Amino acid sequence: MAKAIKIIVSGGPEIEVELGRENRRVADSILSALPIESRARRWGDEVYFETPVESKGDVAREEVDVGDVAYWPAGRAICIFFGPTPVSRGGKPRAYSPVYVFGRVLGDPRVLREVGDGAPLVVRAA
């Protein structure tokens, strides 16, 4: 089973995400759906995109860290946090509603600042 995924934004960055042990069921559901093609959406310093995945994890939370990659069940979306969002308290990222963190960006997640709303992307196994 893959231990990482790549998110490749058309005309933008390519990031690698290391899959963690937390919420492994979510990670496995995402891996089973690969490749995923979608369009990036921006919400503050968060990029998120819809997926065909429907899954639940074990540990949901709203407080996240820069570099966290999570599944948002309310929108069937993958979220990548690289700074504050509109609901943040201070400079720390915060999800709109509970998410299942399943991985971390390898490298600097702030490269996602260059991703525009609607940019095509693909997710594949690394």
Image: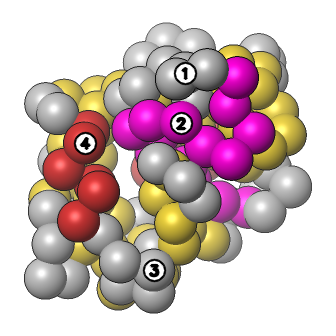
Q: Residue 110, which numbered label?
A: 4
Q: Is residue 47 visible?
A: yes
Residue 105: x, y in percent?
28, 33
Quadrant for the N terminus in the image: top left
Q: Amino acid at mark 2?
A: Pro
Disc 1 on helix, strand or loop?
loop
What is the crowding at mark 3: few (fewer than 14 residues within 10 Å), some, or many (at least 20)? some
Earlier-in-chain disc, 2 versus 3: 2
Q: Name the dominant secondary structure of the magenta segment.
A: loop
Earlier-in-chain disc, 4 versus 3: 4
Q: Amino acid at mark 3?
A: Asp
Earlier-in-chain disc, 4 versus 2: 2
Residue sitting at x 41%, y 26%: 66
Q: Residue 117, which numbered label?
A: 3
Q: Are marks 2 and 1 in contact (CB under 8 Å)?
A: yes
Q: Which of the 4 image quarters holds residue 25?
A: top right
Position of residue 111 in the picture relative to residue 28 (left or right): left
The boundaries of the magenta stretch are 76-89
Residue that badge 1 annotates: 92
What is the crowding at mark 4: few (fewer than 14 residues within 10 Å), some, or many (at least 20)? some
CA distance for labels 2 and 3? 17 Å
